[in-house]
Amino acid sequence: MVDRFYRVEESRHRQSGEIGLGLSIVKNILELHGSEYGVENTDSGVIFYFTL
């Protein structure tokens, strides 16, 4: 299974050196530790959650 992360904020792009690997790296670390994690969209933004 491949998870895709999409950047919707136009002010962030590859020309500024950002390639969007942060979420993927965090996901892999959490999985290596057997943590539960997720993300939820809300009316006021996005909630990321995880257990340690």
Image (tube, grey):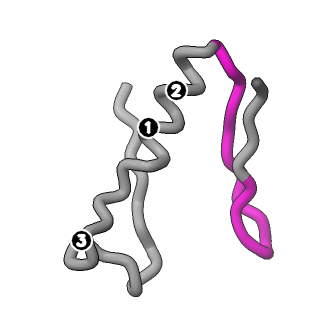
Q: CA distance from mark 3 to mark 1?
A: 17 Å
Residue 38: x and y in percent read 68, 38
Q: What residue does disc 1 label? A: 25
Q: Are marks 2 and 1 in contact (CB under 8 Å)?
A: yes
Q: Does 44 appear in magenta?
A: yes
Q: Three-letter amino acid code at disc 3?
A: Arg
Q: Which residues are magenta?
A: 34-47
Q: Three-letter amino acid code at disc 1?
A: Ile
Number of the label disc, if any, that sits on residue 29: 2
Image quadrant of residue 30? Answer: top right
Q: CA distance from mark 2 to mark 1?
A: 6 Å
Q: Three-letter amino acid code at disc 2?
A: Ile
Identify the residue shown where x is 52% and y is 33%. Answer: 27
Identify the residue shown where x is 24% and y is 71%. Answer: 14
Q: What residue does disc 3 label? A: 14
Identify the residue shown where x is 35% and y is 32%. Answer: 2
Mark 3 or mark 2, earlier in chain: 3
Q: Give SS at disc 3.
A: helix
Q: Give SS at disc 1.
A: helix
Classify residue 44 as left or right of residue 35. right
Q: CA distance from mark 3 to mark 2?
A: 24 Å
Classify residue 10 as left or right of residue 46. left
Q: Give SS at disc 2.
A: helix
Q: Residue furthest left?
A: 15
Magenta part, dominant SS: strand
Q: Residues within 10 Å of mark 3 (few under 14, many from 20)?
A: few
For the N terminus, give its image quadrant.
Answer: top left
Residue 33: x and y in percent read 61, 15
Q: Residues within 10 Å of mark 2 (few under 14, many from 20)?
A: few
